[in-house]
Image: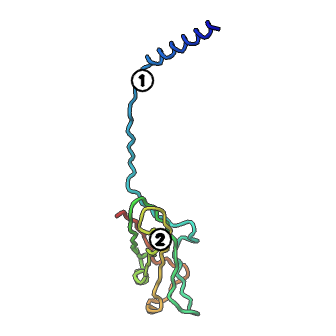
Amino acid sequence: MKKVLGLAVLMMVMLMSVAGLAVSDYVDVPVYLNVPEFVRLSVDSSSPDSQFDLVFNPATPANPSDTVKLLAEANVSYNVNHSVTPVTGYSSWANKLQIAIDTSVSGFGGAGNVVFDVTATLDVLGNLNLGSLTTNTKIADVTFTITSL
């Protein structure tokens, strides 16, 4: 028993000696992150047809309007603008388009994901002198642009 106990003590002393001889070193590796400004604008999947369909109904005359939902994604503050490009031969109608961007939605203009409405309205009642158009006549393209601030 004394031999076993002595042998155990000797092994512990040797283990401590070896542990004391262990060499270690370390190195710090820095981590850098580069996330550039990011803005993206698309038609939201909840928007039924992804286009403005303006239909004037003479039976219940009112200025036609339609709304499309857009999705803004950004990691910076941003602004959204629009421009209207008339189709050749329809500039008289296209110039009457009124585009409204709903900036009152919570989070609009800041970093994050936001779905917001854009609405096109055409003053048909005030411009009856421009004549009639056949169904599904394309008069313009509206381009929405998102820009970081």
Q: How many marks?
A: 2
Instruction: Name, please, the residue furthest toward the front.
Output: 2
Give the residue at x 39% y 71%. Answer: 81
Mark seen at residue 24: 1
Q: What is the residue that sits farthest to the top in this orientation? A: 3
Residue 125 appears at what percent x and percent y? 47, 92
Looking at the rendered structure, the secondary structure element under dot 2 is loop
- In the image shown, does 65 or 57 lie closer to the viewer? 65
Q: Position of residue 143 (x, y in %)?
A: 42, 70
Say few, some or many: other residues with alpha carbon within 10 Å of mark 2 (under 14 / 14 to 19 / 20 or more): few
Type of the residue with mark 1: Ser
**In the rendered view of the protein, which quadrant contains the N terminus?**
top right
Q: Residue at x 54, y 70 (%)?
A: 50
Q: Nearer the viewer, residue 72 or 6?
A: 6
Q: Is residue 16 above or below residue 65?
A: above
Q: Viewer-proximal residue, 134 or 98? A: 98
Q: Is residue 7 left or right of residue 127?
A: right
Gap between marks 1 and 2, in whole Å?
55 Å
Whether 55 is drawn above or below 69: the answer is: below
Q: Mark 2 is on which residue type? A: Ser
Label annotation for residue 106 = 2
Q: Position of residue 27 (x, y in %)?
A: 38, 31
Q: Are marks 1 and 2 in contact (CB under 8 Å)?
A: no
The residue shown at (57%, 92%) is: 60
Query: Where is residue 8, by image quadrant?
Result: top right
Q: How would you rate the neighbour count of disc 1 (Cα within 10 Å): few for under 14, some for 14-19, many for 20 or more?
A: few
